[in-house]
Image (tube, rainbow, N blue to C red):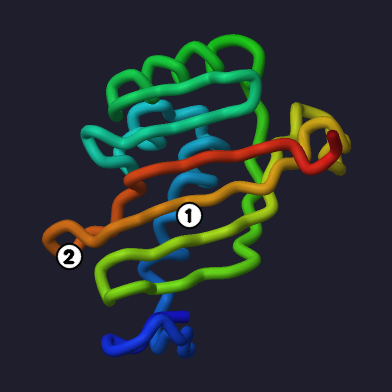
Amino acid sequence: MTMNSDSRTPVLAENDSAVREVLDGIVAAWADNDAEAFAAFYTEDATVVLPGGVHHQGREELRAYMAAGFAGPVKGSRSIDRPENIRIIDGRTAVVVSLSGFLLPGEDEIPAERMRRATWVLAEHDGQWLVEAYHNCSINA
């Protein structure tokens, strides 16, 4: 969805494929356990807020966090992220709400305690869409 320039009334987006490509790329980088590729989808000053008060500021901090995860507790895991709503606000900014979680090796279904609802803010920078901010929270409190 996008917003009319003269109002805050949502209208259908003509093309959200570039935003979906970013989300798909993040999922693919996770599947490859590639922290460098994962972080490349985020802006240099992106913010990431995760459950438990985890807060990361900047691409490098996020890359280091994901590298540690891929080397340890989430090694070999796969991320699942299903957009539930994509709104293109002004042609250059997108807000996405998604259902997400991750599967550890050997799992076929995401356990309830790892199910999340996420909010993404993406912006277009010189023809490339990047994540500006990301937040997720448990949906099974």
Residue at 34% across, 19% down? 61
Q: For residue 97, which numbered disc appears in the image?
A: none
Cα separation, mark 2 vs mark 1, equals 16 Å
- Where does residue 108 sit, x and y in percent of width and height? 85, 42
| Label located before the other in sequence (2 or 1) | 1
Three-letter amino acid code of the residue under disc 1:
Leu
Left-right relation of 6 to 68: left
- Which sits in the foreground, 26 or 138? 138
Which residue lies under the disc numbered 1? 23
Secondary structure of the residue carrying numbered label 1: helix
- Marks 2/1 in contact by CB < 8 Å: the verdict is no
- Which sits in the foreground, 78 or 110? 110
Q: Quadrant of residue 7?
A: bottom left
Secondary structure of the residue carrying numbered label 2: loop
Q: Quadrant of residue 114?
A: top right
- Which sits in the foreground, 129 or 89? 89
Is residue 69 placed above or below 125 in the rendered structure?
A: above
Is residue 101 placed above or below 120 in the rendered structure?
A: above
Is residue 108 placed above or below 16 in the rendered structure?
A: above
Q: For residue 127, which numbered disc appears in the image?
A: 2
Farthest residue to the left: give it.
126
Is residue 123 placed above or below 47 in the rendered structure?
A: below
Q: Residues within 10 Å of mark 2 (few under 14, many from 20)?
A: few
Residue at 28% across, 58% down? 123
Q: Quadrant of residue 106?
A: top right
- Which sits in the foreground, 31 or 6? 6
Residue at 42% across, 75% down? 16
- Where does residue 115 sit, x and y in percent of width and height? 77, 40
- Where does residue 35 sit, x and y in percent of width and height? 41, 26
Three-letter amino acid code of the residue under disc 2:
Gly
Residue at 28% across, 22% down? 60
